Amino acid sequence: MEQIGLSLADWLIIIVYFFFIIGIGFYLKRFTKSEEDFFLAGRKNSSWVAGLAFLSANLGALELLGMTGNTFKYGMYVAHFYWIGAIPAMLFLGIYMMPFYYSSKIKSVPGYLKLRFDEKTRVLNGIAFGLMTLLVSGINLYAMALVLHTFVGWNWDISMWISALTVAAYVTLSGLLSAIFTEIIQFFLIWFGLFLVSILGLLEIGSVNEILSRVTELYQNVSYTTLWSSSTDPNLNGMVISWAGIVLGLGFVLSFGYWTTDFLVVQRAFSAKDLHAARMTPVLASFFKMAVPFIVIFAGLIAIILANDPQSGFQLLKDGNQVNYDSALPMLIKRYYPAGLIGLGITALLAGFMAGQAGNVSAFNTVWTYDIYKSVINKKASDAHLLWMGRAATIVGILISVATAYWAKSFPSIMDYMQAIFSWVNAPLFATMLLGMFVWWITPNGAFWGLIAGMLSSFTLFLAQKFNWFDNTVLTLSDTASDMAINFWRAWWAWLICFVLTIFISFFTKKKPKEELTGLVKGLTIESKDLNISVYRKPEFWAVISLIILVLLNIYFW
Amino acid sequence: MKPIWYFVGLILFLMGLILVVSGISLLSSGETHKTVLGHTYPDLWWGSFMTLSGLIFILVNRTKTV
């Protein structure tokens, strides 16, 4: 393809971004004195700062490119990832789970497992999370280099190393604090840099109704513009999935598994200045999460219309005979953005990739330092030594990410396994956390063996599907299913196996005394209530508002 | 420490300014962009919006510390 040429204005914008974030790293270093400053940003953040960082840690460029491409492939059903597949879980975290996480003053999610269960469950989850994080970070890096190489013609190695070293520099200097600062800057750059694609697409095509009606005309037998009315039969919608798969697999297991247990996002809430701010963190983030489809879904639908209109001259890239769906957003940028704006669009993607990597590395350095190094290797490490170890872990984590990126380059298909990786680690962990926080008699051995069984079953189901050990219909309970639908169902079964086994083993193994579980389990904890603040400042109030908007959006696009 | 919103304002202001200057220089040369809807000069109006948004963030947070 003809690559996008960059003008002086484009280069200036990209250079401003790089100087800016390195400068922020140096500026924040003077405020990063203790290990709590480095790993938890000093626990000083307001709910707005923690909330936007909470959302931005998830809003990487890979997600933006992938979800726009998925909309092209599957239609509006992709909005489920942002609405039912995120909002209920975020609100549940803020309202019900955060009091136990925050009040126990833990530094990581595996740290909670240690207090609630035992050391072996903590180390198991710490190792699984660390591996997952570095793998995802490396894939992120690989994807960034691939996008820049394909669309702008930049050298693969140089663009990867420059961005990796930049992230290493600012995270090593000031840890989570600089990661959070750059995530919030990324949030604004993504909106200012990419929302214009949807605005210009709307101007070209006419209106939202025009977009929906033209996509509906294109697909007469399968719905690409509804959310639920075509979910009674998988054959009626672009994602080839039924409502049960969406609700159980995505809305319950994958969504709750990710948003309530993945330390990458939960760490941002831990950085809040008090329990009220920590509870508000995911609640505030839920409003912005609901708005993201106005970038990705609109862009995907606009791409569908343009690609099916021969007069438009718009096409997605092809890898051989395969359509490259992820090229939808960059091709729209190329279509609409003149000099200067191209630089802004590329910077928004770069910021997304780099902030995603910084988020993964800052979560990794915390889990490595506290849940593996201090827990297993050096139990008597001083605070100063842990701060040094956090910085060293950042550099090592970045180097492993780079190595993973080169590995991904030689096996490009590992990109496809991103969703699968989440279902191996997060889906069963959600069953463990849910039981651990809400049922006091769940035992350490029940949690440990249930978690192992859940992770192994998810991995085994993945292999079974890949090598056709049995028919997929056994998994999905329907005649037909897309790859995405199979992902949802696999997560559901892994969760269920972990849930049932954990309960079963707990019947026969030794329980922890109730007094050791105070502050960790509902029913054994005196929960502090926000009695002295007005109703409109309470997390519950804003959670209800968020839920109402969620319901209205689902009804509008029913 | 300056609040994050101050830095958000700075980067939006700087980037918006680059877009506005780039858009004005093209407009004054009598040319238009070759992209779809390029004749509306999106760099100019979007850049102005960014600059203004950045300026508001800077002004509101210029004396604040956290």
Image: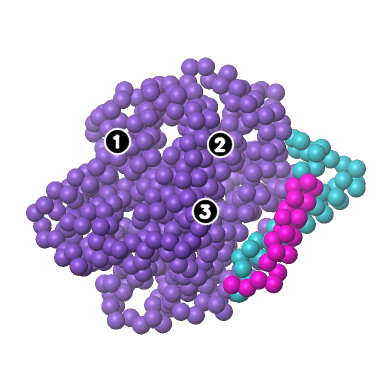
Chain colours: A purple, B cyan
Q: In the depicted view, which residue is nearer to us: A60 or A82?
A: A82
Does the magenta run of residues contain B61? yes
Q: Name the residue at the left extreme.
A: A508
- Please, which chain is the residue tagged with disc 2 on? A
Q: Tell me how far mark 3 sits from mark 2, CA to CA.
A: 31 Å
Q: Position of residue A223 (x, y in %)?
A: 49, 23
Give the residue displayed 18% in from the left and 60% down from the top. Answer: A444
Q: Tell me how far mark 1 sits from mark 3, CA to CA.
A: 49 Å
- What secondary structure characterizes most of the magenta part? helix
Give the residue displayed 43% in from the left and 49% down from the top. Answer: A91
Q: Which of the two marks, 1 or 3, is nearer to us in this view?
A: 3
- Please, which chain is the residue tagged with disc 3 on? A
Who comes first in sequence, dot 3 or dot 2? Answer: 2
Give the residue displayed 27% in from the left and 32% down from the top. Answer: A475
Mark 1 neighbour density, 10 Å: few (under 14) some (14–19) many (20 or more): some
Number of marks present in the image shown: 3
Q: Disc number at residue A297? A: 2
Q: Is residue A434 above or below residue A214?
A: below
Q: In the depicted view, which residue is nearer to us: A282 or A292?
A: A282
Are the residues flagged by discs 1 and 3 in contact, CB closer than 8 Å? no
Q: Is residue B65 above or below residue A492?
A: below
Q: Position of residue A473 (x, y in %)?
A: 28, 27
Image-based side of A227 in relation to A292, left or right: left
Q: Amino acid at mark 3?
A: Tyr
Give the magenta range: B43-66
Image-based side of A198 in relation to A359, left or right: right
Residue under label 1: A465
Q: Disc number at residue A536? A: 3
Q: Position of residue A166 (x, y in %)?
A: 57, 65
Are the residues flagged by discs 2 and 1 in contact, CB closer than 8 Å? no
